[in-house]
Amino acid sequence: MKYALRRIMALVLTMIAVSFLTFAAFHLIGGDPAQAILGTSATPERLELLRHEMGLDRPFLVQYFHWLAGFVTGDLGTSYSYRQPVAELIMPKLGVTFVMVMLSFLIIVALSFPLGMQDAQHSEGKFSWVWTVIGQICMAVPSFFLSIIVSYVCGIVLRFFTPGDFPDMYRHFGSALHYLFFAAVCIAVPRIAMCARMLKSTIIGEMEKSYVRTAISRGNDRQAVLKYHVLKNSLVPTIAFLGQTMAEIVGGGIVVEQVFGIPGIGRFLVSSIATRDYPVVQALVVIMAFWVIMAGTIADLINMKIDPRLRLGGGE
Amino acid sequence: MMKKKIWNGYLIAGLVITSIVLIWIIVGQFYTPYDPTQMTGAKLQAPSAAHLFGTDKFGRDIFSRVMSGAGTTLLVAVATIGIGAVAGTLIGALTGYFGGYVDEVLMRLNDVLTAFPSILLGLVVISILGPGKYNVILALGIVFIPGYARLMRTAFASQREINYIISAQLMGASTARILAIHMLPNTFSTLLPALTIGFNNAVLAEASMSFLGIGVMPPDISLGYMLSESQGMLRTAPWYALSVGTVIAVLVFGVGMIGEGIQRIGKEDL
């Protein structure tokens, strides 16, 4: 419990550090927001007035804490190009991306565990290389290239869905889910191969340890040893790995949303970078980073539940 | 006697595939069948004997374009891995071996950096530095450091309490010697596959960034840039996207097989 508390404290500190780094980075590159809003033809007096209104004449740290307080209370600032609160713009898009990423994550978890275990058990088999090669192929095809192929084959040739015609998720959840499924699969395929491979090599490494030899030589069933001893020990690194995978799913989503024309935060991020809409970019960068940190922390907390050694503070 | 079996099917297949692709790419830096930037034939020609990968909407030979553009991708990937692995190993070795306060601070900083998906971090760095070949290398190099640092930290920390390290310490071996001579070789089984995975991630990351229009910029062409270019011709010249994507996939597949092979060295018979 004490360790869990420490972990959550670390989470909060990391979040603050992430937000600070992001704020500082955009403070450096963002240019003058007042100029961005009023345009180049604005008079110096008006610029000065707006700067004062926005608090841009205050010290950097004051601005940061002001922004952070706003962020915590749901005020993410105002978009330059849409003249609307960033939070209002982001919310519906965040929902879409959330559903897509979680769908992808579920597919990864559901498939990589059975595949990894299967592969580990048959690693001595004659045809195990076939699985390894298939795994390598899955990892080698970039998810956006896969997206192009899938949207062409499933969308244009087979007509399973209409690429570019994303239904309103908040009205037609079912058909939106159907559409997102294809994108989620494209993000998931390389990660499934990676997670399965990771689980497999952990299991094989674990099988060589002496407690396994002891358990088997005492007459335990190989299958049972795998299930009750090895899998439990292999879970910890695999769950940690799954937590890290979240970063790649969120990142991969940015590109895949672009190919499929899904109105999520990734696509919004890219278009906001193009229009230099920094309040939006900054908010999205921080949200994505928070998302990833949360996933890592949840993975750590689950691992602490599984492995008592972690709770006693023996290392990370 | 224990004899390590070095060669296995994966390693051989990976080396053969990768060598063929590498030789093809390296030749492409000096010689291409056509000028990759000039109009060489009819526009939007399907693949034929004269144009193996066809031509694009400007009549440029795609085979020659891919051959020369892949060089940029290769340069970016190798340089990125160099930066990430060297810096990551140094940080990982020091924090893993010493632990304590420095370890805690660096690992928290590491947590902060790993919180940004690599494309996102690359994107933030690029928006500070501006796009271009060398900035992509620098951006991705920085992005890759935390991953290697974390991995190598675990590899080094796991040996800290093992008897041969304690013996070496008791015998008065210097820290540098312990780290470089006693510990580093034992991390190779972790590092080498991570290098091959890292190379592939670098190729894919460069491709993603250039695909989004925030990576390699003309006059340099890379595989990712060409993929984004081919998006606009998907309906008129689908062979463009297909050949560029396939070249990326074959390169990544070959290196992945090498990684797979390395992990299996000495595992087969004892």
Image: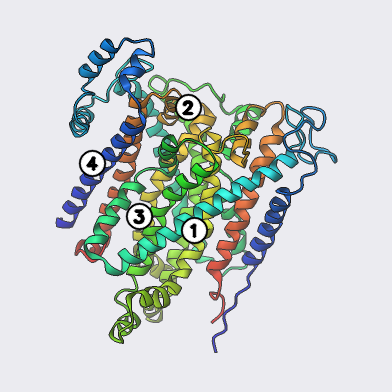
Total count of labels: 4
Q: What's the residue type where badge 4 is placed?
A: Ile
| Residue hosting label 2 | A262
Q: What's the residue type where badge 1 is placed?
A: Arg
Residue A186 in the image: state x and y as whole percent.
52, 40
Q: Against A128, is B65 above or below?
A: above
Look at the numbered disc 1 and give the secondary structure of its residue: helix
Look at the numbered disc 4 and give the secondary structure of its residue: helix
How far apart are the alpha carbons under marks 1 and 4? 34 Å
Q: What's the residue type where badge 2 is placed?
A: Ile
Left or right of B2 on screen, residue A273: left
Please give the label number shown on residue A197: 1
Q: What's the residue type where badge 3 is placed?
A: Ala
Discs 4 and 2 carry the same chain letter: yes
How far apart are the alpha carbons under marks 3 and 2? 29 Å
Say few, some or many: other residues with alpha carbon within 10 Å of mark 1 (under 14 / 14 to 19 / 20 or more). many
The tag earlier along the polypeptide, 3 or 2, is 3
| Residue hosting label 3 | A240
